[in-house]
Image (tube, rainbow, N blue to C red):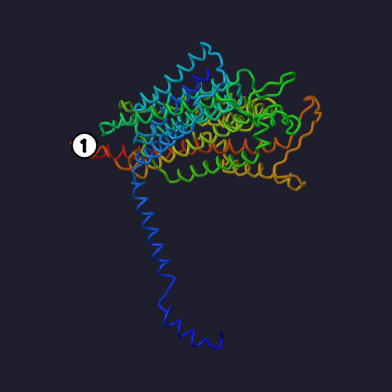
Amino acid sequence: MEILIALIIATLAGAGIFLTLKARTYPIVLGLTLLAYAVNLFLFSMGRLQVNMPPVLREGVSAYTDPLPQALVLTAIVISFGMTAFVVVLALRARHELGNDHVDGVEIMHKAGENQ
Amino acid sequence: MYIKREKLFAWYEKKLGHVDARIPYGALLDSCFALAHRVHGVLHRGNLQTSVYSFIGAALVMGLIGFTYGDGPLFGQRAFMPVDWISIIVTAGLMIAAFGTVRFHQKRLLALVVIGMVGLIVSLIFIKFSAPDLALTQLSVEVVTVVLILLALYYLPATTPHEPFKNKVKYDTAFAVLGGLGVFVLTLAVLTREYTTIGDYFLANSLTGGGGTNVVNVILVDFRGFDTLGEIVVLGIAGIGIFAMLQGLKLYAPPCNEEGIVWSRDAHPHIMQSLLRLMMPIMLLVAVYIFLRGHNLPGGGFIAGLIAAIGLIVQYLANGIEWTTKRLNFDKHYLIAYGVLIAALTGLVSMLLGYPFLTSAFTHVDWPIVGEFEVASAIAFDLGVFLVVVGSTVMILVQLGKLSLGSHKLTDKTLQAKEEK
């Protein structure tokens, strides 16, 4: 199971890195979202993986999973939503100010077209 | 000394008169600026991709040094959990969805659908590994995120063009594979080791100290309340920053989709409208329920806030901005401000009573009909969290939705101008 979760986090991180390296704003938003999933899952798994042990106290139950990483990740999920929203709106504003959705604000496509 | 002063002054004028601290100081400052310019020129070339390459490259190099440094084995001795078939299928599904997002990222709407799948599977993973609170949060954040990106997508090009550089995909793939590999080894290296945790303290003191059985929520509103206070402030700042960025923004909204089909100008569908108007009180009731039970069962301010926000946002989606704004006519800034204020005041009250900031107290009250009910001061703090989450989420999405009012007019004008020509 640990190998599976490591595989999941690795795939998310790899896909996130790939998309973050793109030149348009939208793939970068997607890439950052994937990276946020990867980081949240990674932090969450720092409490090790436990099945059927939610940290909700019950009578006669003494084994619970570690609640601390969960509390930290819960706020991280909400904050990463705030960050995604901010980046998305930044992308819209950039499109408005610059007239394109390239991350550097300069259309490289035109230059390449001229050279061909 | 005083008697000899005139001689000393003369000597000073002659020997040290030309010494001026300003000159070496100025020269030092100039060379500092020059150095900063040179470093800046190397690192920051007005090209985001170069910066991201250097960031990730540096992380990879440091990871490599970390992995090779030291004599101990890379992986620990901790036994693996048994694997079942469902987990393998879910893992495969998530990996397919992640690769799908990469594969289809040029078709933007499709990529959004596929990344939504990733988010849903992540919340399933949280359920599997004993984190019901996280699953609920992830699920509701997912809904809000998809609506958010969908709204923004209307103003962005529908497809991503191919990049002009030939070998870029190869480099990107190499970076992604190396990064993924590093993360894989790092995660496995941690997960195969035993660890000690301070979590036992929270488990032992949650009921006696915080008065709640949902330890995650008690940590959020009580033990680590100061953290949470900071986080709701960040969320509020993000919301207000977005509000500021969207002021005066008029974007050109395309009159048709990429295949040239003109958008339907129909009114909002009646079935959706009447159903969602009926649903709104129920959705808000669910939010209140989740909020109230949060201290003892999975739930709490963050999750309830997101559910209430979704309940309000679907009204905007179903009935249109103009109709809903008339009926929900209050400024969402106030929600953010009151939320932060209530949360901070809860902390200050405990200071007035001579306890440290954000110390919470709780007592049991016997209500008629309802029965025994626990009242904790932490619930006031959680109310602050709730208000900030509702305020910023609804404000972000409504402001983004409002863009279409101005933009439609803009588009209509452009169309008219074209027709006149």
Mark 1 = which residue? A113
Judged from this view, the residue extending furthest toward the front is: B71
**Residue B267 in which image quadrant:** top left
Where is residue B271 shown, x and y percent of the image?
51, 21
Residue type, numbered disc 1: Gly
Instruction: Read off the chain for label 1.
Output: A
- Considering the image in quadrants, where does the N terminus of chain B appear? bottom right
**In the image, A42: left or right of B99?**
right
**In the image, B177: left or right of A69?**
left
- Residue under the point 41% across and 63% down: B28
- Considering the image in quadrants, where does the C terminus of chain B appear? top left
Q: How many marks?
A: 1
Would you place residue A25 above or below residue B91 in this image? Answer: below
Where is residue B386 shown, x and y percent of the image?
62, 35
Judged from this view, the residue extending furthest toward the top is: B85
* Secondary structure state at the residue bearing disc 1: helix
Where is residue B297 shown, x and y percent of the image?
68, 25
